[in-house]
Amino acid sequence: MNALHILHFMERIRPRHAILIILLAIVTMFKTVPGLGNVYTFHIYPAIARFLSKWPNIIPIAVGDIFITASVIWVIAYPIYAITFKKKRKLSTLVIVAEYLLWVYVWFYAAWGLNYSQANIYNRVDMRPVEVDDSTFRTFAYHYADSLNATYAGNNELLFAERKVSNPLKCLTHNCILQGYSHLHGMGINRPFNNQAHAKTMMFSRLSSMAGITGSMAPFFCEFTLNADVLPHEYPATYAHEYAHFLGIANEGEANFYSYIACTSSSNQAVRFSGYYQIFFHVLRNVRGLLGEAEYEAYLRHISPEIIRLAKSDRKYWLSRHNTIIDSTQNFFYNLYLKGNRVEGGTKSYSGVIGIIMAWEGKNSFHNGK
């Protein structure tokens, strides 16, 4: 009887089911076998992304947003339609939905998601996590503050003339970030493989602002999108962060790090300021936590008053768009998503950028000293 059941089951398997099973096995292998994550990121993903990302360039709106929205609607609406109106069996209907979700799962990981399986940045660029003491961090923090102040002083009007991102700023940002990433070869990240890829505007920017989301990587078509509410001085760093995801960086703290390096090494002062400014609040939290309240107050006085006013204005701007319930819900599920993809610390990985920057600067200082 068991043999007959097996034969009957095999007869019902269609070619697409066999393909799906094989793809699921391949995805599982790349997720679990050490070393295959790097093979995917640096040898397979660029070819996939080059192919997938050239098609959405033809369409000005975010194709990935449309796909995700349509998929969610279909997964909810199809069972209701099939069971209520077409009188199909519940089990067969749920099997169809499950198969669709498995195809989406395979597509997600094959198109981009397997980048989560690559080695962390410390292993990729052969550097050690820094052991931070008060003196080391104080030196870093004040050096950072001096750089931030210097890049703000006399900054060009492109960033501050208005509250909306202009087309000249978009073009400037694309060229500067593309150039910046072209020079990061050997730093554990792919070189740009599609110079025509540009950031698209999120379809649901206002909803994203409620959740505190400024940009996203749409993996199904290898697009990266930016929130329409992003301010001009935030735009270059946000662009560079999402471009790092586009190049195969999955970890959020690492994407912040590459954005920081790509921006702060730019010849354009406005782009450099954006790069320094993106980690401003991360630095402040670390100063307060590591050095204490008195040092924190002294540190604030070391920052240009114009930058303090800008930061307060930005906080007010984003809080006016914030929705606590939506943000908490999004943060909860995104935290589960990150941990499910073995991102240590979940959403806290964003703040890991400070440790990476200090480790990178320490490594460079060591080599320069030698």
Image: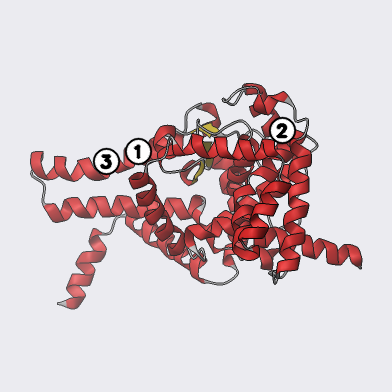
Residue 294 x %, y %: 65, 59
* Pointer 2 or 3: first along the chain: 3
Q: Is residue 118 left or right of 29 when viewed as pictured?
A: right
> How far apart are labels 2 and 3 at the CA level?
39 Å
Q: Secondary structure at mark 1?
A: helix
Asked if the residue under mark 3 is in contact with the one under mark 2, i.e. CB atoms within 8 Å, the reply is: no
Q: Residue tagged by mark 2? A: 175
Q: Vertically, is 276 above or below 164?
A: below
The disc labelled 3 sits on which kind of residue? Trp
The answer to whether residue 126 shows anywhere in this view is no
| Tag shown at residue 74 | 3
> How far apart are labels 2 and 1 at the CA level?
31 Å
Q: Residue at x 45, y 66 (%)?
A: 28
* Pointer 2 or 1: first along the chain: 1
Q: Residue at x 18, y 71 (%)?
A: 5
Q: Residue tagged by mark 1? A: 69
Q: Secondary structure at mark 2?
A: helix
The disc labelled 2 sits on which kind of residue? Asn
Q: Is residue 89 left or right of 308 when viewed as pictured?
A: left
Of 330 and 124, the residue lying toward us: 330
Q: Nearer the viewer, mark 3 or mark 1?
A: 1
Q: Vertically, is 106 above or below 304?
A: below
The disc labelled 1 sits on which kind of residue? Thr
Of 24 and 203, the residue lying toward us: 203
Image quarter (top left, top right, bottom left or bottom right) of the C terminus: bottom right
Q: Nearer the viewer, mark 2 or mark 3?
A: 2
